[in-house]
Image (tube, rainbow, N blue to C red):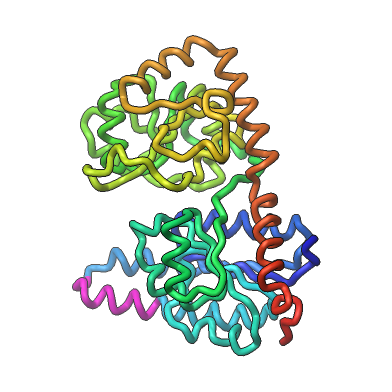
């Protein structure tokens, strides 16, 4: 059993990993660790203003780098002030240079980088990985082997997870019979156009630009994370679609599970999920989640489950049990910490400020 530790969690300025940082902080606290969260969203208003400022692109890029460097310097000072035994940096946390983790190396305090993104799409890991002692990844090989070749001391497969939901009612809209939450990646637009389901409601940026889908848009933008669980719970069917921007890869099977797979089930929602996502190691297909491949089967499954409420509810209930018993952040991070302590525990316990 992992002893109580002093852990610091460093979040990003913005982006999808922000909710993972917050959930990780809560999970570490629930596990009994003294946990400090470094909240870099304080820099978000300045970044938003900069990105919309009427300046030449090269000047905007220079100012953005300056902003991230200031954020990284402030983060470094805050990490040192927290006197941690272990530091967890989420993907996109403001760590731009090796010097931003150097104080930890000087004190032999282990650092962890949780890369909760697709390594093929977001390639900055190639520069970032060497700044950390441990890298956690949501994908297995070939990514883990590539990290080892980069010289990372310890690598581990740590998938995403979920929390027990809190149901703050979203304001100004209600979930529909069939919902999809996410951005308008080309493969999603193509599939949803081909399904032609008028009961569908879309929550996410980009769909309003497409004529056939625009009337189905409930929210054209990114929703606050805390508003997602009630949407999942209130919807009769939640679609979960893979994502790719490359038309040549529309039908390629993915090698990681997106956060919605866990979050929909945790909220008690019924999930109809694309078989391109690797479910088998996490949920029992057709028992805890329903699956489809391609628009014809999706449309058929939508009609079927809209007409069979008792079967739909039974699957949702089993999915929720699985998510909350096996795939919470508390369980995920407890297991990851145990493996880390087996590999590097002497350094963690010896950390001294």
**Left or right: 288 with respect to 119?**
right
Q: Nearer the viewer, residue 61 or 159?
A: 159
**Residue 56 lies within the magenta run:** yes
Image quarter of residue 153: bottom right
Q: Residue at x 69, y 70 (%)?
A: 7
Q: Is residue 335 visible?
A: yes
From the viewer's side, name the closer residue of 223 and 95. Answer: 95
Q: Is residue 89 visible?
A: no
Q: Is residue 303 above or below residue 12?
A: above
Q: Nearer the viewer, residue 331 or 6?
A: 331
Instruction: Residue 54: give x, y in percent of width and height.
Output: 22, 68
Identify the residue at image location x=56%, y=45%.
226
Q: Identify the residue at image location x=41%, y=14%.
A: 303
The extreme bottom residue here reads: 106
304 left or right, relative to 111 = left
Which secondary structure type mostly characterizes the magenta part of the structure? helix
Residue 271: image x %, image y %? Answer: 51, 29
Asked if the stretch drawn in magenta spans residue 33, the answer is no
Q: Is residue 314 left or right of residue 146?
A: right
Location of residue 309 in the rendering, given as x and y in whole percent from the top left corner: 55, 13
Q: Quadrant of residue 84?
A: bottom right
Which residue sits at x=49%, y=25%? Answer: 290
Magenta residue span: 55-67
- Residue 102's x, y, as percent? 54, 86
Q: Is residue 37 above or below residue 66?
A: above
Q: What quarter of the picture does the N terminus occupy?
A: bottom right
Query: Across the whole image, how many numbered discs are drawn on residues?
Result: 0
């Amino acid at each position: 059993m992992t002893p109580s530790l002093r852990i610091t969690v460093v979040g990003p300025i913005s982006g999808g990993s922000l909710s993972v940082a917050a959930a990780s902080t809560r999970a570490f606290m629930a596990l009994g660790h003294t946990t400090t969260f470094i909240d870099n969203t304080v820099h978000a208003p300045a970044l938003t203003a900069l990105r919309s400022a009427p300046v030449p692109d090269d000047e905007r890029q220079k100012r953005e780098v300056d902003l991230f460097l200031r954020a990284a310097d402030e983060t470094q000072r805050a990490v040192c002030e927290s006197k941690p035994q272990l530091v967890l940096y989420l993907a996109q946390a403001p760590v731009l240079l090796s010097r931003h983790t150097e104080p930890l190396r000087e004190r032999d305090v282990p650092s962890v980088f949780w890369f909760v993104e697709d390594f093929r799409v977001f390639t900055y890991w190639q520069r970032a990985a060497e700044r950390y002692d441990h890298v956690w990844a949501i994908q297995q090989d070939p990514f883990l082997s590539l990290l080892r070749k980069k010289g990372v001391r310890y690598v581990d497969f740590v998938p995403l997870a979920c929390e027990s939901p809190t149901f703050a009612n979203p304001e100004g809209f209600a979930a529909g019979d069939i919902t999809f939450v996410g951005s308008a990646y080309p493969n999603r637009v193509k599939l949803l156009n081909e399904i032609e389901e008028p009961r569908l409601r879309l929550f996410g940026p980009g769909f309003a630009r497409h004529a056939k889908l625009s009337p189905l848009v409930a929210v054209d933008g990114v929703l606050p994370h805390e508003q997602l669980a009630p949407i999942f719970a209130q919807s009769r069917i939640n679609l979960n679609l893979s994502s790719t921007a490359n038309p040549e890869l529309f039908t390629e099977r993915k090698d990681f599970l997106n956060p919605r797979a866990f979050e929909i089930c945790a909220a008690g929602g019924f999930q109809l999920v694309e078989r391109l996502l690797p479910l088998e190691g996490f949920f029992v297909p057709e028992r805890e989640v329903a699956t489809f491949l391609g628009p014809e089967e999706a449309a058929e499954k939508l009609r079927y489950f809209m007409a069979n409420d008792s079967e739909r509810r039974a699957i949702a209930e089993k999915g929720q049990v699985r998510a909350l018993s096996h795939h919470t952040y508390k369980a995920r991070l407890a297991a990851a910490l145990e493996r880390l302590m087996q590999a590097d525990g002497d350094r963690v316990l010896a950390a001294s400020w």
